[in-house]
Amino acid sequence: MNILVINGSPKGEQSNSYQLTNAFLRGIKESDSEAAIRRRTVCQMDIRPCLGCFSCWNRTPGKCCMEDDMAQVIQDLLWADITVWSFPLYYYTVPGGLKNLIDRQLPMLLPFMEEKEGQAGNGGHPSRYDMSGKRTVLISTCGFYTAEGNYDGVYSLFDHFCGRENYTAIFCGQGELFRVRELSAVTSAYLSVVEQAGREYMSGGISVQSRERLAQLLLPRETFEACADASWGIEKETDGTGKEGGSKKTESDTLKFTRQMAALYRKESWPGKDFVLEMCYTDEEETYQILLGKDGSHVCTDGSLTADTRIETPVTVWRSIAAGEIRGDEAMMQGLYRVQGDFNLMLKWDEYFGGSHAQTRQQAEASAQKNTDMNILLIPWIVFWVAVSISRQPGCIIGILTCALVPLAYYRHRKTVYDVFGGALVTGFSVAMLAGVSETWMLPVSYLVFGLMWLSSCPGKRIPLTMSST
Ligand SMILES: Cc1cc2nc3c(=O)[nH]c(=O)nc-3n(C[C@H](O)[C@H](O)[C@H](O)COP(=O)(O)O)c2cc1C
């Protein structure tokens, strides 16, 4: 299998989107270790804008009049079985450099008017080459909190270019988070899902389950936007009319970091009274206070508040903790930082600032890779049917106990609605039989209910009785 990656980010290898692409390729490689991968980075190539002369259609059919790297790209496109287009969203479409490359594919088309199957239906040109069986993947991040509604231009372009339904897209909002080390627990979990999507893509298609996880926001909108605003290190100003007028001085990295930490505060965890956390960065000799209130957080830079909890730490240590590289409790035991005042905040840190400390990166990756298992659904039913057939009362108790043990399986597997619903039904049948309902009709009813549940799960692309796609 030949795979061509076209990296259209002007940032080259530093691209956020490219991190997703690399995760996807890891998944592909796991499924097909023989896959050959060619990578082309648009910003490192000489690809000039199309002159619109149509030489490639009349004077020199199939050959552009300009001699630059595009000839090689066309060879690569013909070589590839799968082309992965990796790019950021720029002004609701692809970046200019990549658009040039797309335009320069004109020599690959014949000039005649002909609609290809699956195309949008308003005009097209046949391919000069046999492109049948070739597959296309689009991977992109954008800066807004969601990808939804922002990619209309890209969908429209590729619907015409590849044909509707003829490509697979992974579009992710909050793309700039992929470069924030302190949020690597969140982004690594997402990258694990992309990797899983790569594996699934090679074995038939991305599952509904992975699709749903890819569509989830990395951070809630409000938290993300507060974090994004803080990341510029520029304070918002308001002019006399109340409209946002401009911006003030550039802030130090430490203050930026503190503001981003404050942005992760979950106001739902407000304990009924405002709380002041003082961060004293010993290596930078900077101290800031974060007021944690009912309506959100506020960073105070003049030290005018009275601290409830004071943390004295080198900023490097706190950043490593925030990045999930070292555990907060272990770092404290090792004396890497000191806490003064109310210690309660430390005990409830994850409740207050879930985004940064809730999980280590390994935990996040592990949870992203959890799969469903149909045995979790089947075992309680089978145990119930067999045990009740042998002996009614102990059988019912065994049925209930089996259902009670099922949640233990969720440490290793993802639960589905069928697991939960099935467990509740088995418990219900067992309790009803313990209460005296006869098994002569209760058992057939249970077979019927199970059959109905199976039937109801059949429509769609899912494997019946699971949330997994076929
Ligand atoms: C010139 C420019 C235009 C952008 N336009 C958009 C946009 O229309 N919508 C959006 O959500 N993000 C937009 N962004 C943000 C990028 O899509 C976002 O930062 C992305 O994660 C960058 O990905 P990369 O690191 O792969 O280049 C824009 C960024 C730049 C520099």
Image (cartoon, helix red, strand yellow):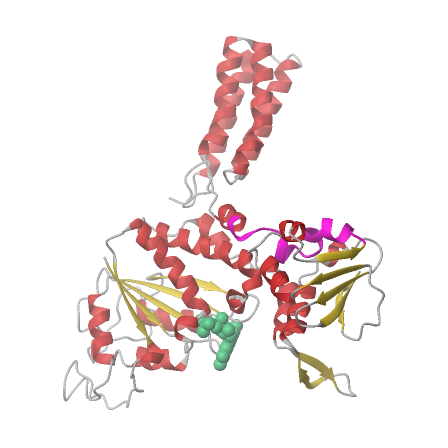
Q: Nearer the viewer, residue 413 or 330?
A: 330
Can residue 72 be seen here? The reply is yes
**Residue span colored magenta:** 342-362
Of the 4 image quadrants, the one containing the N terminus is bottom left
Classify residue 446 as left or right of residue 347: left
Instruction: Please tell me whether residue 193 is drawn above or below residue 93 in the rendered image.
Output: above
Instruction: Please tell me whether residue 393 is drawn above or below residue 445 in the rendered image.
Output: above
Can residue 452 be seen here? The reply is no
Classify residue 74 as left or right of residue 156: left
Q: Does the magenta portion include 353?
A: yes
* Total tally of numbered discs in the picture: 0
Residue at position x 15%, y 83% from top?
Answer: 61
State the residue lying farthest toward the front: 335
Which x, y percent locates residue 25? 35, 58
Task: Give the dominant element type of the magenta stretch: helix, strand or loop.
Answer: helix
Which x, y percent locates residue 43? 36, 79
Which x, y percent locates residue 305? 84, 68
Residue at position x 66%, y 49% from top?
Answer: 333
Q: Does the magenta portion include 350?
A: yes
Which x, y percent locates residue 36? 24, 60
Q: Nearer the viewer, residue 10 or 437?
A: 10
Of the 4 image quadrants, the one containing the C terminus is top left
State the residue lying farthest toward the top: 391
Instruction: Please tell me whether residue 437 is drawn above or below residue 247 in the rendered image.
Output: above
Q: Nearer the viewer, residue 457 or 274?
A: 274
